[in-house]
Image: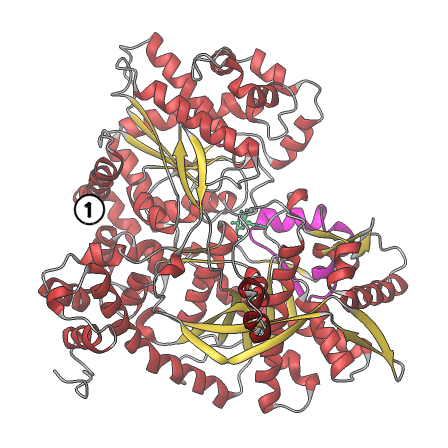
Amino acid sequence: MARDDMPQSDFRDAILWHLAYTLGKDPDHAQVFDWRLALSHAVRDRIVDRWMAATRATYRADAKRVYYLSMEFLIGRLLQDNIVNLQLADEAQAAVESFGLDYAGLLLDEPDAALGNGGLGRLAACFMESLATLGCPAYGYGIRYEHGLFRQSFAEGRQVEAPEDWLEQPFVWQFERPEARFTLGFGGRVATRDGRAVWEPESFVQAEAFDTPVIGWRGAWANTLRLWAGRAVDPFDLDRFNAGDFAAAVEAEALARTISRVLYPEDSTEKGKRLRLTQEYFFSAASIRDILRRFEADHADLRLLPQKVAIQLNDTHPAIAGPELVRILHDERGLPFDEAVGITRGCVNYTNHTLLPEALESWGEGLFADLLPRHLQIIDRIDEADAKAHPDRRNTARGDGKVRMGELSFILSNRVNGVSALHTGLMKTTVFADQHRIWPDRIVNQTNGVTPRRWLLGCNPRLSRLIAQTIGDGWVGDLEQLHALEPHVADAGWLDAFAAVKAANKADLCDWIAREHGVALNPQALFDVQIKRIHEYKRQHLNILEAIALWQEMRENPSADWTARVKIFGGKAAPGYFFAKDIIRLINDVAAVINADAATNEKLQILYLPNYNVTLAERLIPAADLSEQISTAGKEASGTGNMKFALNGAPTIGTLDGANVEIRELVGAENFFLFGLTAEEAEARRAVPDHAARAIAADPRLTRAVEAIRSGTFSPGEPDRYANIVENLTRADYFLVASDFADYWRAQREVDFAYANRTEWTRMAALNVARSGWFSSDRTIRGYMQDIWNAKSLLGQE
Ligand code: 6GP
């Protein structure tokens, strides 16, 4: 094949062509890495035409565009996802195997792009895929971090963090856009000229765009994920270099790149750092300029902006986009202030993802004024106008020497949404009660969802095949069709096939764990999985306490008919969150002791897999029997892992928290293991003096489990290693671990009992699948399009 014979149709030839002409490699000497890149290029070629067609259609229709601003996009690997959505899986596999290569191995060679911490970032990635699937013209805007979320390993059970380096390899999916650059100012002062405020920043950096196409199901539509990288306005100072000061010559570039260097490894905790606020302004301001540039290319009247532009703030991290838009419209384009605010409010909407007070961002006035002096004035002016209109208003954006980003987002938004019914309700009665009283129509609910392409079709091919054989393949684009599985649940033969899928997935996981981690698991055991960020409110320590109590009871009563269990944990702790890191170490210490106990280890094993990420989730969820969703009620805004487990046939053990409530309603109370205090009861329990000590005293199992930790059973020679955890559990126990323990124990024994009747269990698991269709992110995005953005699908018009 020659260079000019760029193959159009034959996929195998396309791979060979890219191997030669894009990568300069001879097939005889190509490594897995080269083949993977060649395959990726061949796949990317199939995306580009559709991507351009979608962009052209959007221009032609002058359609309203949705802009999803998010500090995080936890996209994971893209090769398989793109292949699945282009329906190229069989062709790609055949081509790869014809070269004598292992297809799965090739897919796994791709680095996992971890440009996010957890739920918020992964939701943004699912939303991008659903927006494309639904043909909604949309752009994701974020930061192109050089280093994503840190890599986690364990040393003597303790979390060790190492930098993540996904960009050390070529990222095939992106297109660099050197022509799309904006210069952004920071600091300085606000001057007055001709009676108007003019911001005179002190320093400048440039934002450079990198575009990644996001292709929807069946390749019908593609949108753009545009990530900004920092660069210096003058990257190289030749005078300084010639003077021999080589480091200083590139100092400006090093500083500018710092902005997009690392993802803050924070989840639900606020990090009051200058760099973080700089990052937030950097990507929000670059995005606003890009949005205006696109709008102004075709429209002269800025008052049309709300008809053409919907901006979604993914939590408060991009909240500064609001004042930035007001500033440009007023200071730079000359619109009256009130009109600028009105237009901004017509475009901007805000999603809240947590009620935890420490996660509600606020910045000291000093820092804010130093970095964004003009924005501070704008915020004050909006606050003042609101105060005049609503004299009884209490929660303003400015107050207590702080700029409060939740309030700021609220007052500059058209719609504000929560992410599950319970969470939205609590927003109205707690953090945003004051605002809700004044603007009762502003808060709406959009319960989260997950994309079925990645979280069923891609990650669970066996179950997908069984479903397709049973009800056809319409469910992939219309997940509610899974309801058609329900009648088959009464069919013993079908249930056997369903059980065989889970067994095969578990066998695969066991093989992988044996290979990678040298641990042999009992595949007959119930696989009980808790994977998510480590946080006190998510209560991994409740889970490990139950494991300790179970182990103690097994030792006491070895001949009882115990249901064998493997407890699997995965998740990272923010590096500065010491309590969470103690929990990690405790789980690892407990695992070491219990796994070494020959008296029980056929019945109980504990495994903490390091470096939890999207890829690991894709491995674990299809093989899970039980989904642990055990947060203190009122604290988990929604959860999305909970949806993935249910969709893959793992019933939940959980509290009435976040979207668990809706999962339970839909799958049926009899197919969900409920325990624990409700959000209301939890609030009341906190007021009871000594609630923790009382709960422990009332429960001999809990007393004994806590005592084992306290006395050093899991930290021989160092009994006070977990003094902090013990102290917390026995005294303040804000997250009510002790109060919920007894009921959790009861629900776990119900699980044991139910799992022992394998047919009944399989029925329950299958009903979880059949009834989880509502949790597709397609449904969520339709809700946003209708209730929040007023945006239309352009499918069929490309
Ligand atoms: C998370 C919430 O904790 C989780 O419950 C929810 O499912 C997810 O957002 C998506 O809505 N919040 C975050 O990850 C976060 O950083 C500031 O909130």
From the image, which quarter does the C terminus lie in? bottom left
Question: Could you tell me which residue is drawn at 30 percent across and 46 percent down?
Answer: 619
> Quick one: SS at disc 1?
helix
Q: Is residue 568 above or below residue 548?
A: below
Asked whether 157 or 239 is in front, the reply is 239
* Count of all numbered marks drawn on residues in the image: 1
Side of 288 where 476 appears, left or right: left
Question: Could you tell me which residue is drawn at 77 percent across and 68 percent down?
Answer: 188
Residue 674 seen from this side: yes
Residue 675 seen from this side: no
Whether residue 641 is in magenta: the answer is no
Asked whether 662 or 275 is in front, the reply is 275
Q: Where residue 115 appears, x then y in whole percent? A: 47, 57
Q: Where residue 228 appears, x then y in whole percent? A: 52, 69
Q: Is residue 200 above or below residue 535?
A: below
Q: Which residue is mark 1?
A: 494
From the image, which quarter does the N terminus lie in? bottom left
Looking at this view, name the residue that lies furthest to the top.
556
Looking at this view, name the residue that lies furthest to the front.
243
Q: What coloring was used for the rendering? A: secondary structure
Image quadrant where residue 10 sits: bottom left
Whether residue 424 is in magenta: the answer is yes
Question: Could you tell me which residue is drawn at 41 percent across and 85 percent down?
Answer: 797
Image quadrant where residue 444 sits: bottom right
Asked whether 774 or 289 is in front, the reply is 289
Say what amino acid the circle numbered 1 marks.
Trp
Q: Read off the magenta span.
A: 408-434
Q: Where residue 344 appears, x then y in whole percent? A: 70, 73
Q: Where residue 729 appears, x then y in whole percent? A: 58, 22
Crowd around label 1: few <14 · some 14–19 · many ≥20 (10 Å): some
